[in-house]
Amino acid sequence: MKKKEIAKKQHKIFIDFEASGFGDDGYPISVAWGSKTGEIKYFVISNIFSPDWKFWCEDAEEIHGLSEDFLKAGGVHPLVVCNAMLDDLRGKSVYAQGAGNDRFWLERLMSYSGEKIDHNISILEAVGKTDRQIKLLNYKVSSDFEYHHAKSDVRELIQIFAL
């Protein structure tokens, strides 16, 4: 099979993170990834395992709707998430809306595990190829929503870009 034929058969993988806050002091609190051919994997990440992960922004909580108490009670260890990501995404390019932010959160998560992400996972900007995809993305960004969850965001990116 030729490289072009293989590339056509592979489906884009999309990723999205939510974080404790908007700046350098923040840390990833949830992540999801998936493609239109498979399940969407979703993790809530506990902050109790890292002494450095203390920053909490109430404005960010209003957007993602995940409380710090919820993370402590129901989140998983960051290493569990790192291992799952490396198992599924190592050597692959994944797409995100706001790739720079998601790459930052990926680096923060992987640094916790001691993994370097260079050449392991590449995050690329998800860009629309058609006017319809761009309009759908603009609608998604501007429409009213109750909360901004990584899993639903990945599902929406799949619907918009994996047409």
Image (spheres, rainbow, N blue to C red):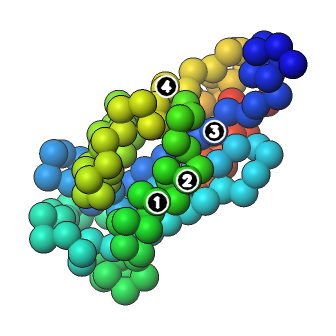
Tell me which residue sits at (46%, 37%) in the image: 121
Measure the alpha-carbon separation of dots 2 and 1. Answer: 6 Å
Q: Nearer the viewer, residue 91 or 108?
A: 91
On screen, residue 51 versus residue 27, left or right, reads left
Q: Is residue 119 above or below residue 34?
A: above
Measure the alpha-carbon separation of dots 4 and 3. Answer: 12 Å
Q: Residue 65: x and y, percent?
A: 41, 67
Residue 95: assigned label: none
Secondary structure of the residue carrying numbered label 4: strand
Secondary structure of the residue carrying numbered label 2: helix
Secondary structure of the residue carrying numbered label 3: strand
Identity of the amino acid at label 2? Asp
Q: Is residue 85 visible?
A: yes
Residue contact at pointers 2 and 4, CB within 8 angstroms: no
Identity of the amino acid at label 3? Ile
Based on the displayed image, in which of its 4 quarters is residue 11 positioned?
Answer: top right
Tell me which residue sits at (18%, 65%) in the image: 53
Measure the alpha-carbon separation of dots 1 and 4. Answer: 23 Å
Name the residue tied to disc 4: 125
**Who comes first in sequence, dot 1 or dot 4?**
1
Residue 83: assigned label: 1
Residue lying furthest front: 1
**Who comes first in sequence, dot 2 or dot 4?**
2
Name the residue tied to disc 2: 87
